[in-house]
Image: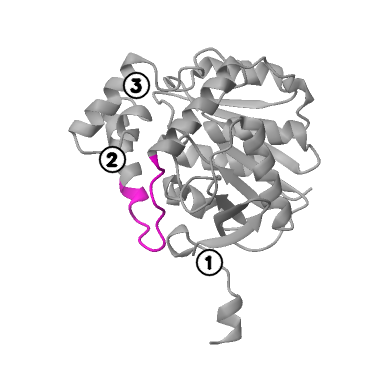
Amino acid sequence: MDEKFALQRPTTWASTPNRRIVAGQHMFVYRDLGPDRGVPLVLLTHLGATLDEWDPRFVDAMATDRRVIAVDLPGVGGSTGQVPATVAEMADSVEGFVTTLGLTQFDLLGFSLGGFIAQQVALEAPGLVRRLVLAGTGPAGGAGIDHPTGGTYIYWDMVRASLARTDAKEFLFFPRTRAGKAAARAYLARLRERIMDRDEPISLSSFHRQISVIGAWGRAAPQDLSRISAPTLIANGDHDRMVPTALSRDMHARIPGSALIIFPDSGHGGVFQHGDEFIAALRSHLGTDD
């Protein structure tokens, strides 16, 4: 094999192979793409999600000029072990993963459950996180988080998705407007573009453990978010029914110097429905390696 080709890093989500690394008691599966320079962007995803839930358009856009690393949390997808019992334990596992990779500083983006973990990492290890992005998420003790799938509308949306033989995210992430329906179809089609090395879906037991962790986060005492020192971008749709949009505004009020974007006519998946705007805002927020 040509040495230059062997050393070439993947540049698209569809062509990025799964990689594995042992950190502590877990073997993590992750994907690593984009030029290996500057401060990497680490991605943490939502309840029940494997690596294949990341929008390829979003990842590819971010990987044009920076290293992007996405990881399956313990007990999810290809990563081994049991789902940690608390958000704090999940954060510890993420810290172990990135330090085993040899990262001494990184930018961190957490979506939904991943945003809970990202807050915890930023609080526990401020020296590791250069810039923070919290999307579709909320703080510990946030009203409504303790019942992540308990709302009647969420249960009904999951039933509707099952009857329609489609992904529940079509109903849970996007509004049932003309624009929302079109955005949902386009998003789900993009998720199917990757063919190689696809993840196994999360097991039912791991899904239930994640739900328990989220419920405990919602019942926890509020944290002192003023201690987050990393410049922070907060983004959500204006009608998030899974993690109420009001919680994004709450975090914005409590994290010093944070920036807030609320996308119109969108829900939990607002950052994917308004992908171009989110990517532009994120690239501006991350800036250069200062």
Callout 1: SS: loop
Q: Give the vertical position of 216 relative to 109 (above or below).
A: above
Mark 2 or mark 3: name the one nearer the start of the chain.
3
Q: Assign the magenta stretch its main secondary structure.
A: loop
Res 18 visible: yes
Q: Amino acid at mark 3?
A: Ile
**At x 50% / y 61%, what residue is drawn?**
18
Q: Amino acid at mark 2?
A: Arg
Sequence-first tag of 1 and 3: 1
Sequence-earlier tag: 2 or 1: 1
Q: Residues within 10 Å of mark 2 (few under 14, many from 20)?
A: some
Judge depth for marks 1 and 3 and give the one in front.
Answer: 3
Going by the image, does 250 lie left or right of 77?
A: right
Q: Is residue 227 above or below residue 273?
A: above
- Crowdedness of circle 1 by 10 Å Cα count: few (<14), some, many (20+)? some
Given this view, does label 2 or label 3 mark the residue nearer the observer? 3
SS type, badge 3: helix
What amino acid type is highlighted by mark number 1?
Pro
Residues packed near mark 3 inside 10 Å, few (<14), some (14 to 19) or many (20 plus): some
- At 43% from the left and 46% from the top, the residue drawn is 55
Label at residue 195:
none
Percent x, y for residue 162?
A: 23, 33
Identify which residue, 130 or 127, lies in the foreground: 127
Q: CA distance from mark 2 to mark 1?
A: 27 Å
184 above or below 212? Answer: below
Which residue appears at 35% of the width and 49% of the height?
A: 190
Question: Residue 193 magenta-drawn?
Answer: yes
**SS assignment at label 2:** helix
User: Which residue is the site of mark 3?
Assistant: 154
Q: Which residues are magenta?
A: 189-203
Which residue bears the numbered disc 2? 185
Q: Is residue 118 left or right of residue 204?
A: right
